[in-house]
């Protein structure tokens, strides 16, 4: 079943912060985060595994709460290059990922 | 180290024709996934293959669609007798091993337009 992402869209000014949430109704083993710019391939950002860890990639970090079956992606001090659509993909300890509908982030100067 | 390669990048077919989409995984990767993406939507799983084996094709329509990943050469997604509803972006991703604890790297996609 497809995870639910929120919000659907967010508009930021450079330097502002944002949080994107990804919730699943199924038990999660892994959460994968990707960013896709219009007309391009999704780019892998990070993967979080069961265990509630937090990871970071430059000023983008994420957390995984397995009890709540959700993950959050944190965009800190956003840059223009952060614009794009962010997808979470969730795995249930097999191999198949289910992707959310995406959150469109627009960062303005 | 080349990433995942897909060709063609754009493909136009008339209704009833066949479409063949190719995917070469990253070097060292033997696991390939195909996804379909409609405009403004997320990625939908279609099929998962390892070399010479289809592991899971539960996301692929039973008719007109087929996929293979031969011992030599790229993975191929084949759509026979295309219809307008097949118009979409088709992405393949490769992974170094089986399991969702491994990252999947995506190719640039093939944008199929059926006229």
Image (cartoon, coloured by chain):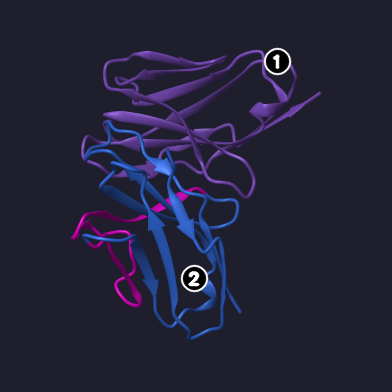
Chain colours: A purple, B blue
Above or below B30: residue A103: above
Characterize the local packing of mark 1: few (<14), some (14-19) or many (20 or more) Cα atoms within 10 angstroms: some
Image quadrant where residue B70 sits: bottom left
Q: Which mark is residue A56?
A: none
Residue B57, position as x, y percentages in the image: 26, 60
Lateral position of residue A79 relative to residue B58, left or right: right
Q: Residue at x 46, y 49 (%)?
A: B43
Q: Quadrant of the N terminus of chain A?
A: top left
Q: Position of residue B14 (x, y in %)?
A: 56, 83
Residue ID for mark 1 = A16
Q: Is residue B74 magenta?
A: no
Q: Secondary structure at mark 1?
A: loop
Q: Nearer the viewer, residue A53 or B32?
A: B32
The residue drawn where x is 34% and y is 22% is A68
**Is residue B62 shown in magenta?**
yes
Q: Which residues are magenta?
A: B42-70
Position above or below: B90 against A83: below
Residue that numbered label 2 is attached to:
B86
Measure the C-alpha gap from mark 1 to mark 2: 40 Å
Q: Chain of mark 1?
A: A
The reply, left or right, for residue A5 in relation to residue B64 is right
Residue drawn at x 37%, y 34% as measured from the top left:
A24
- Whether residue A25 is visible to the viewer of this picture, yes or no, is no
Q: Is residue A4 visible?
A: yes
Q: Where on the picture, by quarter, is residue B115?
A: bottom right
- The vertical placement of A97 against A52, above or below, is below
Pick whichever, A68 or A19, lies toward us.
A19
Count neighbours of disc 2 (C-alpha within 10 A) and say few if under 14, some if 14 to 19, many if 20 or more.
Answer: some
Label 2's element?
helix
* Dots 1, 2 in contact, CB < 8 A: no
The image position of residue A67, as x and y in percent, is 29, 19
- Image height of B111 relative to A30, above or below: below
């Amino acid at each position: 079943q497809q995870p639910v992402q929120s919000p659907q869209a967010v508009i930021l000014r450079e330097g502002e912060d944002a949080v994107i949430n990804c919730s699943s109704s199924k038990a999660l083993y892994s959460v994968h985060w990707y960013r896709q710019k219009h007309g391009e391939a999704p780019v892998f950002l990070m993967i979080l595994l069961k265990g509630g860890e937090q990871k970071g990639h430059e000023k983008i970090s994420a957390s995984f709460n397995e009890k709540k079956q959700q993950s959050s992606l944190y965009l800190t001090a956003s840059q223009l290059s952060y614009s794009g659509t962010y997808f979470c993909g969730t795995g249930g300890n097999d191999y198949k990922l289910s992707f959310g509908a995406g959150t469109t982030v627009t960062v303005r100067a | 180290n080349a990433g995942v390669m897909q060709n063609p990048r754009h493909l136009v077919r008339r209704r009833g024709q066949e479409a063949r989409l190719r995917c070469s995984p990253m070097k060292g990767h033997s696991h390939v996934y195909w996804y379909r993406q409609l405009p403004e939507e997320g990625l939908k799983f279609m099929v998962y293959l390892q070399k010479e084996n289809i592991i899971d094709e539960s996301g692929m329509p039973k008719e007109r669609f087929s996929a293979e990943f031969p011992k030599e050469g790229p993975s191929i997604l084949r759509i026979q007798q295309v219809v307008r509803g097949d118009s979409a972006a088709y992405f393949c991703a490769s992974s170094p091993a089986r399991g969702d604890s491994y990252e999947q790297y995506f190719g640039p996609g093939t944008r199929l337009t059926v006229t």
